[in-house]
Image (spheres, rainbow, N blue to C red):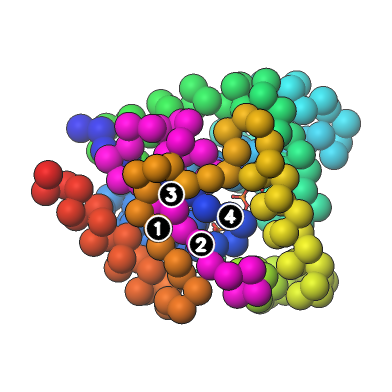
Amino acid sequence: MAFTVAIDGPAAAGKGTVARQVAAHFGFGHLDTGLLYRATGRRTLDGLTPIEAARALRADDLDAQDLRSPEVAQAASRVAAIPEVRAALVDFQRAFARRDGGAVLDGRDIGTVICPEAEVKLYVTASDDIRAARRHIELTGKGHDITYGAVLEDLRQRDARDSARATAPLKPAEDAVHLDTSQLTIEEAVAAAITEVNAARKT
Ligand code: CDP
Ligand code: CDP
């Protein structure tokens, strides 16, 4: 049976971490939809047009090693504002969301556009400085040479662009449960999300 958990929120709020662990806990599939936009943006850096890049996207592209850099994140956020790019990626996401056995998708528009009927919707946030500090630790740990200030700037620019765009902007669904992870450990954030899923499964 299909059961969809939609997780949205601004950059580096903890969406992916929560999504991955909730999926593992319940045995659901997990799709990090940011990777679709990152892989599309990555290919525009090689000269493809955004629409060509989105239409040519293949599952293998999501495994590319260099998708996590801030340069690729910025390219992702630029292509993500183009309605035809988003349209090219909708069917794949919806099919994943309704697969048998349950699915967790994290992104910006999962609860609002991709899966408005999701059984559980979470809107994950954290303060700007905490998100930047966490992402800075993550990136430097992976060998990226980047300052805290540059990470903060990347997050703020993308959040502003993602919130202001006309098509599928970053915003909470009206019926989303808000989860501020600023003062939560990963374990606490995951436990709060699991509680929401369990509550929805009982109804
Ligand atoms: O997917 P999203 O960009 O929203 O965030 P993430 O990649 O899941 O989390 C960003 C960073 O914050 C990762 O390095 C997580 O390990 C860390 N994190 C944390 O320290 N505490 C939390 N409650 C959630 C995430
Ligand atoms: O991990 P982080 O939160 O920093 O970014 P991401 O989730 O990998 O998303 C990268 C960019 O893709 C975002 O800044 C958005 O512009 C775009 N995106 C989107 O528009 N819609 C989604 N469902 C997921 C990502």
Magenta highlight range: 105-130
Q: Taking 11 as reference, is 171 left or right?
A: left
> Is 159 in front, or is 88?
159
Label 1 Cα crowd, 10 Å radius (few <14 / some 14-19 / many 20+):
some
Separation of disc 3 and disc 4 at Cα?
10 Å
Q: Which residue is mark 1?
A: 178
Q: Which residue is mark 2?
A: 125
Which numbered disc, 4 or 1, marks the residue that appears first in the sequence? Answer: 4
Q: Give coordinates of residue 116: x percent, y percent.
A: 38, 32
Amino acid type at image mark 4: Pro
Amino acid type at image mark 3: Ile
Q: Give coordinates of residue 103: x percent, y percent.
A: 34, 41
Secondary element at image label 2: strand
Label 4 beta carbon less than 8 Å to ligand 2: yes
Q: Which residue is mark 3?
A: 7
Label 4 Cα crowd, 10 Å radius (few <14 / some 14-19 / many 20+):
many
Amino acid type at image mark 2: Thr
